[in-house]
Image: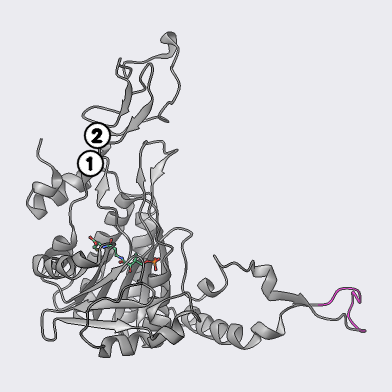
Amino acid sequence: MTLLGDMEPAEAESVYFNEYSAPKALPKHEALARAFIDLHVEDNRRVVLVTSGGTTVPLETQTVRFIDNFSAGTRGATSAEYFLQQGYAVIFLHRQYSLLPYSRHYSHSTNCFLDFMDEAPPTADAANPDHGSIVVRSEYQDEMRDVLRKYRYAKQNNRLLLLPFTTVAEYMFELRAMAKLMRPLGSNALFYLAAAVSDFFIPRSRMAEHKIQSQEIPAHLQGDTVDDSEEIYTGENEIQPPKNQKKLVVNLDPVPKFLHRLVDGWAPDGSMVVSFKLETDPSLLVYKARTALQRYSHHLVIGNLLSTRKWEVVFITPDAPHERWIRVPKARRSKSISGVEDQVGLAEIQKGGSAQKPTSQ
Ligand code: 9Z3
């Protein structure tokens, strides 16, 4: 059987998208996005699709277990704020429950949101004199006011559309649909693909329907999915609950690289496409980012290493200088956990940095 990764991009697209049914939320997301895009086409405003957070790879159709990755969505949520500040409207396609623009300052942190609150002293003339109003603690007032104003502005002016996904298949459907809907934007469309997209998945045809069992199933309950092997095998046929299994063996196929289709087919002519490349081995990063840029012929690959991604990124571009490193100075690193964007700002990132090799940790 030919792997999707070995097929021509258009064929891989048709095979992949025929294998899955579209996510239930897609029609609703499309309607919201269409209205959002129409509004900004009318105002001749730039619209960026920011993808953010990790995709899951389910092991069962009725999913109990899935493979996930580390991404919390910091890069995507932070960058979205900077795009909004630069006047863009943002479609924020994100992993459900990952970090969101603005609320990220107060969620997923070591502080519970209640730690930001206080009870004001009761007022004498209040209807309920024992109960003071709940207020933000004084030390957080300035920052929260600033964040709140920006959040309100984005909301009241329809600048931010939040669309969640969970699985890698949902992500692919949403990406394709959004890119096609963005066509009327032409060169006012930007794609900023910061989501951590799984490279491997289990094709629907090989996925177990029910929860994979770890115990022997009594003979009278066994369907025709039981074999005599000693492994649970997500291989050629289905995940098999074995009689005396000790291991779960998962057999994954490569996810087709739809960046090709995004650039050549789905996205509007004249739009800009920025992708990210994540590696852990410093000696591979620039090579892999360059290869991606050559292979998909888009505009910019931003490379980052897992261990240093908050402090440095490398811009790989088709034109000179081809390789440009952007770094947060050491002295400023400990002040923020959010990343390069918060430290130097998107505008400065766009201006660039010096061409040097990655720093060691
Ligand atoms: C990235 O490289 C992002 O910068 C991170 C952000 C996922 C590292 P956090 O959410 O992390 O701030 O913690 N994203 C892209 C990774 C990716 O899957 N790229 C694909 C690939 O490398 C291409 S689109 O093949």
Q: What span is colored magenta in the figure? A: 124-132
Left or right: residue 54 compared with residue 267? right
* Residue that sits furthest to the top in the current view: 220
Q: Is mark 1 on a helix, strand or loop?
A: helix
Would you name the residue on which mark 2 appears?
205
Q: Between residues 332 and 361, which one lies in front from this camera angle?
A: 361
Residue 357 occupies which quadrant of the picture?
Answer: bottom left
Quadrant in which the C terminus is drawn:
bottom left
State left or right for residue 31 relative to residue 331: left
Amino acid type at circle 2 is Ser
Between 253 and 8, the one lying in front of the other is: 253
Marks 2 and 1: in contact by CB < 8 Å? yes
- The Cα atoms of the two marked residues, 1 and 2, are separated by 8 Å
SS category of the residue bearing label 2: helix
84 part of magenta stretch: no
Q: Is residue 228 above or below residue 290?
A: above
Pick whichever, 64 or 241, lies toward us: 241
Q: Name the residue under label 1.
A: 19
Q: Where is residue 290 in the image (x, y as percent from the top left)?
A: 13, 70
Which kind of residue does numbered mark 1 sit on?
Glu
Residue in the image at 30% along x and 68% along y: 305
Q: In this view, does 67 lie above or below 74?
A: above
Residue, far left: 8
Disc 1 beta carbon < 8 A from ligand 1? Answer: no
- Residue at figure coordinates x 27%, y 61% from the top left: 175
Observer-nearest of 187 and 352: 352
**Ligand 1 occupies quarter:** bottom left
Whether residue 182 is visible here, answered yes or no, is yes
| First along the sequence among labels 1 and 2 | 1
**What's the magenta bit mostly, secondary-structure-wise?**
loop
